[in-house]
Image: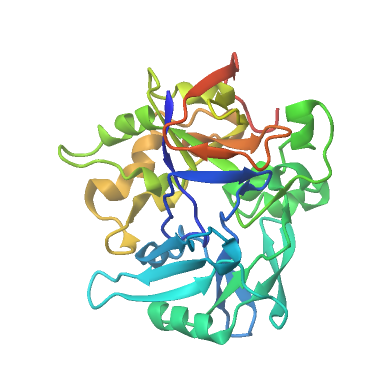
Amino acid sequence: MHISRILVYPIKSVRPYEPSSAEVARHGFTHDRRFMILQVQPDGSLKNMLIAHYTELALLFAEINFPEDHDAAKASIHLTWRPPHGDSKAMDIPLVPDTTSLERIHVTMHFSSTDAYKMDDQYNKWLSACLGYDVVLAYLGENERPVLMSTYQKNNQSQAQQAGWLSSITSKLPTSIGTIISGEPQADDKITFADCAPFLVVNETSLHDVSRRLPDGEEMDITKFRPNIIISGAESSWEEDYWSELQTSGNVKLHLVQNCVRCVSLNIDYATGKPGEGESGKVLKKLQSDRRVDKGSKYSPVFGRYAFLGKGDEGKSLAVGDEVTITRRNAERTTFGE
């Protein structure tokens, strides 16, 4: 098996940047999901924008442009708005903004909170004009969020159970990802604006099983699953359900600790930025027929595995073409809450 694609999302919920290689850190790929768009509410509060509920975010494409010396301080995110009708337009955003004069804001995702920075109005106004309503662009900066899987507090359980699949998952997860990986609790488990974990690993062979559920000539777009690492060459579909640990030829180890359960974002038509019509708008339902395989989240289908970086591997790189070896498998599928 090999890594066939690497996907980095400089801005959460927009279309990904696809480099040939990327540096890994404990919080994920170095430049993954360090920005997020938030909608300004009538009372002035800010609401997190996720592609499942703001389908028009699929019309925003992000590329990272590095200078010849690859100095991140001089790099930029080239963000392009490509509506189905009308002209495209683009804007450059500094990859590592100077935060000295930026307003600090507070962002909470799934009960995991952090401080962030509100970007200058030139970026907020440009995005607002594209989307048709007021938004701000938040930059994480030096801040990071506590890992959702390891820091959920029991006193939030009743509230979480009313807040959707992702929050209910957190009420059941282990007390420390570090305990899973090394047997030692780790207080510094951190992530960016990613939902649950630093990396999401998917099996390209399983995609073929999804595509066969669509009419002839249609194929499922794997980027709708929002993966970071796509692995090709697996012998069978869904074998990743049992993957526990993998190692690459670049000597990077990933611990695959939980399943990724899916929502309506699979049904989005990426060409229009709207919910899909026809059979491609029913992918979630099609997977519910046989992919509700996690007893801890029994109403949601599974595609992919959440992963954490191996101890001591920070600063290494993953590259397209790296050979992948599954070094540990689970005898049974993992279950949320166990």
Observer-nearest residue: 49 or 178? 178
| Residue 186 location (% of width, % of height) | 82, 39
Q: Give the residue displayed 69% in from the left and 52% down from the top.
A: 160
Determine whether, in the image, residue 216 is placed left or right of residue 336: left
The residue furthest top is 331
Q: How is the image coloured?
A: rainbow
| Residue 175 location (% of width, % of height) | 79, 37
Check the picture and name the quadrant holding the N terminus: top left
Is residue 309 shown above or below 136? above
Residue 197, can we see it?
no
Q: Give the residue displayed 45% in from the left and 82% down from the top.
A: 126
Observer-nearest residue: 23 or 173? 23
Observer-nearest residue: 195 or 80? 80
Determine whether, in the image, residue 301 is placed left or right of residue 294: left
Observer-nearest residue: 115 or 123? 123
Q: Residue 331 sits in which quadrant? A: top right
| Residue 241 location (% of width, % of height) | 51, 25
Is residue 11 shown above or below 204? below
Determine whether, in the image, residue 234 is placed left or right of residue 190: left
| Residue 219 location (% of width, % of height) | 25, 41
Residue 260, can we see it?
yes
Q: Give the residue displayed 39% in from the left and 48% down from the top.
A: 224
Is residue 96 shown above or below 16? below
- Number of marks in the image? 0
Check the picture and name the quadrant holding the C terminus: top right
Q: Residue 133 sits in which quadrant? A: bottom left
The residue furthest front is 69
